[in-house]
Amino acid sequence: MYWKIFLLHFSILAAAIVQAQSRHTVPNRKLDCMFVEEKQNEELQALGPTAIKRKALLLSGDLSGNEKAIIFKLQESSLDIIQYVGEQPDKLECEIRRYSTHGIHVPWPQQGKEAIMDIWFTVTIKHLNSRFTATSFVRQIEAPDSQHSEAKVADENSPIGDADILLVQVSYIVHTSTPLIRTKLRQDLVLDCGYKIDHSTDFNIDWRYQHKGTKRKLFSYNGRHERVEHFEKGVEVFMDQIKNGNASIRIKNIGINNEGSYICSVYVPPLFGTHTIEVEIMESPIVSVSPDSLSVKEGDEQKLMCETGRYYPLDVTVKWLREQGGGHMLPVYMPNVIFSPHRRNTDGTYNMSSFLRFVASLRDNGATYTCRVEHVSLEKPIKRYIQVKVEAQPQIFLFILTLVTILVFCTFLVMLLIWIKNITERNKKKPY
């Protein structure tokens, strides 16, 4: 008898543990969002729909909103959208929109409270520094009898008041931890795309690429028939993890032609979740100057060269500066710099040369000429320095130069006096 009672209590406890593990208790959390709707302006139909934004709150747990806003209260679900809200609120952007299934109805298993037919919303949470993006598909559900104050949206086009409270439940999540990737060439990249569904069902996965008018299909997977199609060489899929929510791909040996937008789509009828991952190539320039140091004589004309190579993308800024010896004065930007055209390398990177000409003077002695290169891939500019030493012309040379100048002047003066004397004698009146 006692054993039967013990086993009964044990089975109840085990069932409770399993149920608790399969569902997430929603923690207390509040997130400021914007509820975005697109409305057609009858007077400006040619301009298309206008986005109207209203304040909204995403609440979880036992919290209640006490400010004027559309409140979306997250109810208990097997999926947890709050796991993506571990950052400070000022680093997050939250946007809630209606989601239309365009009349397609696929029965969705109910969890807990009764769901309203086909009333869907998307909640997209983005990190402002592109650390992640997560889109959750939530369904509106009926309020319990004790909560008649909650709003009921009759259909996907029903108006929602500025202070309405809607009970919603997370049913499906698509997320990425790599919405923006900046990478060097010849790397292997993993483009993260994951999904979570609150029940076991069929799904399709599709990857596409687009950039500057170029579009192509990379990969597709049909879950119902377990059919895989590879369209792009060098793209790998984690097939052993695809049924467990990992729809990521790996691109091997990244080149310039891999730069662009990658669209990951996970279709769980009737919901179509998609994220765009931007891949940007960033190659920092290699900078060198010639000569490294310079020792010249006063009056010599010199050419300094700065070679900037193997950078991508194209935009680069090169400036020459001159700093007087001792560092007591601020550097001065040099004018009249000559630039060569950008030269493209076989891997798609670029080279460019810049030249600075100057005539050495004694004030250049101890001066430093700097080639300063700025590029989007650099946190701070690259600087390369040329130290200049200028020697004064020898004194014997100045003495000879002065002596020659005096002799030339004296010769000119004597010739002038002779010329004047001849003119004077010709102009004298003869005595007869």
Image (tube, rainbow, N blue to C red):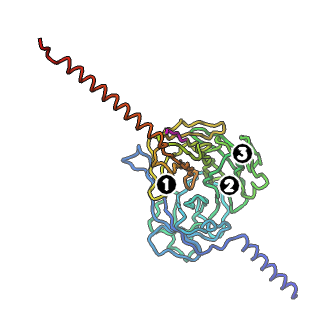
Callout 1 secondary element: loop
Q: Where is residue 370 in the image (x, y as percent from the top left)?
A: 52, 49
Q: Position of residue 100 (x, y in %)?
A: 56, 54
C-beta proximity under 8 Å, tags 1 and 2: no
Quadrant containing the C terminus in the rendered view: top left
Residue placed at 27% from the left, 26% from the top?
417
Q: Which region is colored magenta?
A: 300-304
**Front residue of 253 and 243:** 253
Q: Mark 3: few, some, or many residues within 10 Å (few <14, many ≥20)?
A: some
Q: Amino acid under label 1?
A: Gly
In this picture, residue 232 sits left or right of residue 124: right
Judging by the rendered image, the residue that carries numbered circle 3 is 253
Gap between marks 2 and 3 measured at Cα: 17 Å
Q: Amino acid under label 3?
A: Asn
Q: Is-magenta flag for residue 355?
A: no
Which residue in the rendered view is the most extreme toward the left?
432
**Front residue of 117 and 57:** 57
Q: Nearer the viewer, mark 1 or mark 2?
A: 1
Residue placed at 40% from the left, 50% from the top?
41
Callout 2 secondary element: loop
Q: Residue 192 carries which label?
A: 2
Quadrant containing the N terminus in the rendered view: bottom right
Residue 174 seen:
no
Judging by the rendered image, the residue that carries numbered circle 1 is 325
Question: Which numbered disc flags the more N-terminal residue, 3 or 1?
Answer: 3
Question: Which numbered disc flags the more N-terminal residue, 1 or 2?
Answer: 2
Asked if residue 390 is positioned above or below residue 88 in the image, the reply reads above
Gap between marks 3 and 1 measured at Cα: 47 Å
In this picture, residue 107 sits left or right of residue 316: right
Q: Amino acid under label 2?
A: Asp
